[in-house]
Image (cartoon, helix red, strand yellow):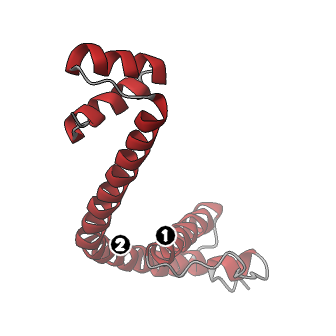
Amino acid sequence: MKLTPEILEELLRLRASGKTQNDLQKHVLKKHGIKVNQSSLSRCLAKHRGERAEISRAVVQAYAEKSIPADLEAMDRVQEKNLQLLDEAQEAARKVPSLANVDKVVKLTAAVARADETKRKALGLDDPTESINYQGLADLVGLALE
């Protein structure tokens, strides 16, 4: 008799719970009446684990292909709002260069940068060697304080 996919799933669960190969051999013999040697059991489990991993990858890939475009559109809407708020905050900081106004600009600038970085990663465009060189806080927040 052959180890069915159902039996292999059962054995993988038992293995994950800490059972040894010897325990699995005894379990298969006792519950299913199948005598299997340790190397065969190991090969069967490895093959089944690999097949299960391929199925999992396909499911995740299908989900990502379906959900990422909608997620990116939502990110674009949020980024558009953040940029609008940043423009308003920069204007307020130019008019009244208070610590509170500059702090708001700094926080919104960081939010815009994080969102841009997240989108670049989602699109596979992130390059760890690429970096932005800011020439001081004024460049970072887009202010030209006189």
Give the quarter of the image for residue 128.
Answer: bottom right
CA neighbours of label 2 inside 10 A, class few (<14), some (14 to 19), many (20+): some
Q: Nearer the viewer, residue 47 or 84?
A: 47
Q: Residue at x 59, y 60 (%)?
A: 100
User: Where, by quadrant of the figure, is residue 62 drawn?
Assistant: bottom left
Q: Residue 75: which numbered mark, if any? A: 2
Q: Quadrant of the C terminus?
A: bottom right
Measured in 3D between alpha carbons, the distance from the residue under mark 2 to the one under mark 1, in whole angstroms, is 9 Å
Give the answer, above or below, for where 74 lies relative to 146: above
Q: Secondary structure at mark 1?
A: helix
* Nearer mark to the viewer, of 2 and 1: 1
Q: Are marks 2 and 1 in contact (CB under 8 Å)?
A: yes
Residue 130: where, in percent of width, then height?
69, 82
For the N terminus, the quadrant is top left
Residue 113: horizontal and vertical position, in percent? 55, 73
Q: Compared to 9, does 15 lie above or below?
A: above
Q: Is residue 76 left or right of residue 37?
A: left
Provide the secondary structure element on which disc 2 rests. helix
Of 63 and 90, nearer the camera is 63
**Label 1, on which residue?**
118
Q: Kindly identify the amino acid type of the residue bearing the numbered disc 1.
A: Thr
Query: Residue 108: x, y in percent?
Result: 52, 68
Q: Which mark is residue 101?
A: none
Residue 103 point in image, percent of width and height = 61, 63
Q: Nearer the viewer, residue 63 or 110?
A: 63
Q: Earlier in the sequence, mark 2 or mark 1?
A: 2
* Residue beneath the point at 38% across and 42% down: 44
Residue drawn where x is 39% and y is 40% of the image = 45
Q: Residues within 10 Å of mark 1 (few under 14, many from 20)?
A: some
Q: Amino acid at mark 2?
A: Met
